Image: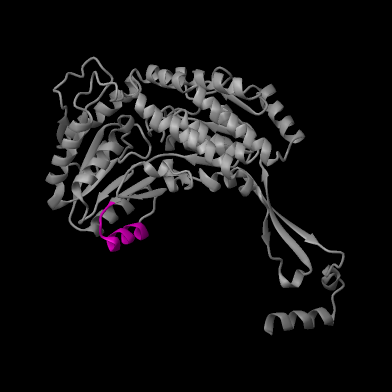
Amino acid sequence: MRESEHASTQPVETAQGSGDPPNPVFQAQQRAFRNNPMPGSRERIRNLNRLKQAILASRDEIVDALNADYSCRSTDETLLGEILPSVEAVAFAARHVKAWMKPVRRTPGLLFQPAAARILYQPLGVVGIITPWNYPLFLSMGPLAGVLAAGNRAMIRMSRTTPATAGVVARMIAKTFDPDLVWVAEGGDAPGSEFARKPWDHLVFTGSTTVGRHVMRAAADNLTPVTLELGGKSPAIIGPDAPMDRTAQSIAFGKLFNAGQTCVAPDYVLCPEGRVDDFISRFETHVRNMYPAMTENPQYTAIIDGSQFSRLTALVQDARDQGARIMTINPAGESFEHTRKLPVHLLLNVNPDMAVLKEEIFGPLLPIIPYGSLDEAVAWVNDRPRPLALYYFDTNRKNTDAVIARTRSGGVVINDTLVHVAQDDLPFGGIGESGMGQYHAREGFLAFSKARPVLFKTRFNSGPLVYPPYGRRIHRWLYRLFLG
C-alpha cells in the first residue's frame, strides 16, 4: 500500500526535520551494533513487545493525526488498515523469532567429510526505512517488525505529506526506544536522496516506481541492498463462472478502502463481455450500501491533498475527451465542490491510449475492460508491467489454476481483494516494476538477516590429499571421480 506513480515524483526528502538522519545518530547506531552484534531472542522479543504496546497506547493519537492529515480519514479504516495489521505483524514476529533464529543444519559434501555445516542467521546492522503517506503507520511498523526480529537497528523516514502522523510516530518511538536502536525522521521540504545515499546495511523503500528508481540509484553508490515495495496497476479479473454479487462486493471494498489510495487496490476490471452490465449493476448497489452518503460521511475517506485530487480529476477528463463513458456513483446526489472527496467513477469504453490505463490510478476510479475469452484477459495482463497484486474471481478450479500459472504478479488473491497484505505468515513484495524483495512472515526475518554459511572441520583434515604438488595419484583419483 503506497504512493502512486504520481504521488511523489521527486526524489526522497532529506535533512533532520526534513528526513535525513543526522550523522551522530547514524554513527551511534553503527557503534551500538558493533557493541551488540548478535542480540539474543529475549532482547528481540522484549523490543517487539515494547513496540506492540507503544502502538496500542498511541492508537487514539494515530487515528486523530491521520484524520487531520487527510482532512477526513475513516477511523475504522485506520484501525483496520493501520493499527491492527501493525500490531499483528509485530506480535507474530515476537512469537516466532526464537524459532527463526535457530541455526539450520546442512550436509557437507562426501568429499569433505568429516565435517559439519550450519547456516547462522545474523543481523545485518543499521537498516533504513522510507515510508509513504498512504499507510504511514503500517508501512513503517511492518518492515520494522522484521528489522527488530532480525536483531538490527533502524531509522525510519516518514513522509512530509502526513506531518501530523509523522509527529505522532516520532514521539511514540522516542518514548519507547533509545535513538541508537530506533529513530524516526519526520518528512521535510527539501528534495534529494541523502537518506538513501547513506551506507545502510539494508534499505527499504515503499512508494512509487518513479521514486523507487531514484532510491535505487542513490543506494547503488554504497552497494546497499534494497527492498523496493512499489505499485502498479493491479487487475481484477472476473472469470466466466465468478459469483457476480460477491465479486462486485469484494471489488467495491478493495477499490474504495482508503478511497482507493492503496497500492494493491484493484486498478481496473477485466470482465466477460456478456457480464459487464450485471457487474455494473451489482457494483453500484454495493457502493450505495457501503456509503449511502459521502461528503459528510466520516467513513468515506478524502483524497490526501489537492495535487492528488487534481491528478484524479485530470484522469477522468482525459478519458472523457477520448470518448470514454463516465458513470458517477453519487448515492445521495451530493455536491463535492468544496471537499477533497471524490465520488466513485466507473469508466467504460476505455482504450489503452488513455492515461487512466497507463498510470496507477490511486483513487476511486475504476475502468472496466470487456474481454471475449479468458486467454484475452490473460494476454492483456501479460502485455503490461507485472503488477503488485492480481485478483481472480471464479469457482472453476481449472481456470483459476491456469490464470495463476500463466501470469506473474507480486501476490495473488482468489475470490477477494486486499486481504493478502494482512496475512502474517505470507511474504509481501513485488516483481519487476512493482518492486523487488519482500518482507512479512519468516521471509521478512530472512530479508534483514545474513544467512551465513559455516563449515566446521574436525581435527582430521582431508585437505592435504588435494594440496600441491600434484602427481599421478591425484590424476587417477580425479579420473575415477569424474568417469566412475
User: Residue 78: horizontal and vertical position, in percent?
Assistant: 39, 27
**Residue 416 magenta:** no
Residues 240 and 437: in front is 240
Residue 204 against residue 396 in the figure, above or below: above
**Residue 394 magenta:** yes
Choose top left, top right, bottom left or bottom right for residue 17.
top right
User: Residue 340: horizontal and vertical position, in percent?
Assistant: 28, 20
Choose top left, top right, bottom left or bottom right for residue 418.
top left
User: Residue 242: horizontal and vertical position, in percent?
Assistant: 22, 53
Residue 129 against residue 372 in the figure, above or below: above
Residues 74 and 236: in front is 74
Instruction: Please indicate, yes or no, whether residue 125 appears anywhere in the rendered image.
Output: no
So how many labels did they put on this image? 0
| Residue drawn at the location 15% of the way across and 46% of the way down | 276
Choose top left, top right, bottom left or bottom right for residue 7.
top left
As drawn, is 342 to the left or to the right of 27?
left
Which coloring applies here? one colour
Give the magenta part as a residue range: 393-406
User: Residue 427: horizontal and vertical position, in percent?
Assistant: 48, 47
Residues 230 and 189: in front is 230
| Residue drawn at the location 58% of the way across and 27% of the way down | 194
Q: Is most of the magenta stretch helix, strand or loop? A: helix
Residue 166 against residue 383 in the figure, above or below: above
Quadrant showing the N terminus: top left
Quadrant showing the C terminus: bottom right
